[in-house]
Image (spheres, grey):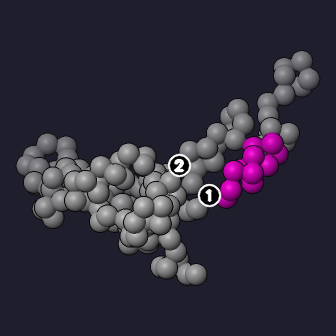
């Protein structure tokens, strides 16, 4: 099954988008995201749902309100001040931060699927074995 045909559970969709399940449900209720496909325990989401969630997040991070996003409006231009004088646009993206060991972090883009929990546990164990700080008396 290719990425365009993949089905996502509510948990997977929320995790990939870097938001909570509650937020997904709120977006559906507010009309920002289409309802899931299927019914009951067979309900699922597809790539279009994930793409829309990532789009809504990006629009929010660029300064648009949920009302503007829902209505398809552009943000109101800012006159004067620092925001209007910037010559470079700020590029934002959603990332997940995983602390693997004290002082060791892994940052993963929200559209990248994380491996199963067991594989992450193996990575955490490896980091604890090989990348932890040594006590000062051992140096």
Q: Residue furthest top?
A: 137
Can residue 31 be seen here? The reply is: yes
Q: Classify mark 1: helix, strand or loop.
A: loop
Can you tell which of label 2 and label 1 is closer to the viewer?
1
| Pointer 1 residue | 114
Magenta residue span: 115-126
Q: Position of residue 34 (x, y in %)?
A: 29, 65
Q: What is the crowding at mark 1: few (fewer than 14 residues within 10 Å), some, or many (at least 20)?
A: some
Position above or below: 104 against 71: above
Q: Examine the image and state in which quarter residue 139 appears.
A: top right
- Tell me the residue at 67%/58% (across/down): 115
Q: Position of residue 17 (x, y in %)?
A: 44, 56
Q: Position of residue 138 (x, y in %)?
A: 91, 23
| Pointer 2 residue | 96
- Tell me the residue at 10%/54% (across/down): 76
Can residue 62 be seen here? The reply is: no
- Tell me the residue at 9%/46% (across/down): 80
Relative to 1, is 77 on the left or the right? left
Relative to 34, is 116 on the left or the right? right
Is the residue under label 1 in contact with that under label 2 (CB below 8 Å)?
yes
């Amino acid at each position: 099954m290719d990425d365009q045909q993949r089905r996502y559970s509510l948990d997977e969709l929320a995790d990939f988008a870097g938001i909570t399940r509650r937020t997904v449900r709120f977006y559906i209720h507010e009309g920002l995201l289409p309802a899931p496909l299927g019914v009951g325990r067979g309900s699922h989401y597809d790539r279009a749902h994930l793409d829309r969630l990532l789009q809504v997040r990006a629009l929010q991070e660029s300064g648009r309100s949920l009302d503007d996003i829902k209505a398809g409006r552009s943000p109101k231009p800012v006159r004067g001040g620092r925001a209007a004088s910037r010559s470079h646009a700020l590029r934002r993206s959603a990332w997940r931060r995983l602390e693997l060991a004290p002082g060791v972090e892994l940052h993963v883009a929200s559209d990248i699927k994380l491996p199963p929990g067991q594989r992450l546990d193996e990575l955490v164990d490896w980091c604890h074995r090989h990348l932890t700080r040594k006590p000062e008396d051992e140096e």
